[in-house]
Image (cartoon, rainbow, N blue to C red):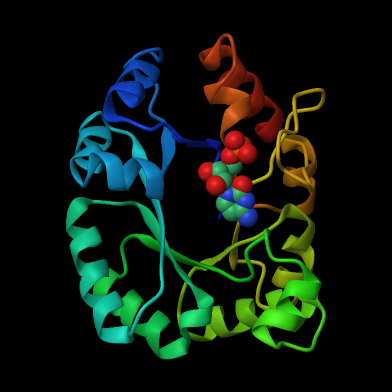
Amino acid sequence: MREERPIIALDFPSFEDVKTFLNLFPSEEKLYVKIGMELYYAAGPEIVRYVKNLGHSVFLDLKLHDIPNTVGSAMAVLANLGVDMTNVHAAGGVEMMKAARQGLGEGPKLIAVTQLTSTSEEQMRDFQNIQTSLAESVVHYAKRTAEAGLDGVVCSAHEVEAIKAETSQDFVCLTPGIRPAGSAVGDQKRVMTPADAKVIGSDFIVVGRPITQAEDPVAAYQAIKAEWNA
Ligand code: C5P
């Protein structure tokens, strides 16, 4: 199920920076934002309550990975914060993912990270000792994620087709690494435009710096949103 709002990655170091950024938008514009580790560890759960109170939706990107009992209890806490979506590492295993689902409840979306995009195939073979291709490993984790009852995965836009083919068309694919044509790629290696992400079937796109670092973040957001929904 496709989300029309691009998710804005709030990669800011402090609460104050987030307030300044969100104040740029008219109050009736309800956003979908991603809060990651840096901001959450700096500002605490209060940042989630603040953003939710403004009427925005929150994807809390904390990538939990621990024993099932611990992850399940932590997820219950996050559910109480009112997050709309959060995630775990699929590498924690099916039992951990099932515990996460149970702790979070059925309301919020729960997705998994498969292989981090910073992991190369060589690293995966040498360090994790997984002797397949990276693409096969990603699809393998996605299938286990679906079996555990999660809603989907975080993945590269280039992996969406294969993942949906091996799980289901309804299995959520959330894709970062999105860059409107002509914008700075930064440290992202394999990027895709919002229009192309739509064509290949992404359900959620995550966009950070092309919006947060733009001269006019509101205009940049509107342009990306228009391209994603065109
Ligand atoms: O600024 P940019 O658009 O590159 O931000 C993308 C966001 O998505 C960042 O918060 C980054 O950590 C996150 N992300 C990513 N690639 C992944 C997983 C998460 O860029 N594979």
Task: Determine which quarter of the picture holds residue 53.
Answer: top left
Closer-to-camera residue (53/44): 44
Q: Quadrant of residue 145 in the image? A: bottom right
In the displayed structure, 52 sits above or below 156; it is above
Image quarter in which the N terminus is found: bottom right
Residue at x 20% of width, y 52% of height: 81
Residue at 52%, 77% in the rendered image = 90
Q: Which residue shows up at 65% across the image and 20% down it?
A: 223
Quarter placement of the C terminus: top right
Number of labels in the image equals: 0
Residue 14 in view here: yes
Residue 99: image location, x then y, percent: 32, 83
Q: Percent position (x, y) of residue 120?
A: 76, 66
Judge from the rendering whether residue 161 lies leftward or rightward of residue 223; answer left or right. Answer: right
Percent x, y of residue 41: 29, 47
Residue at image x 30%, y 76%?
A: 71
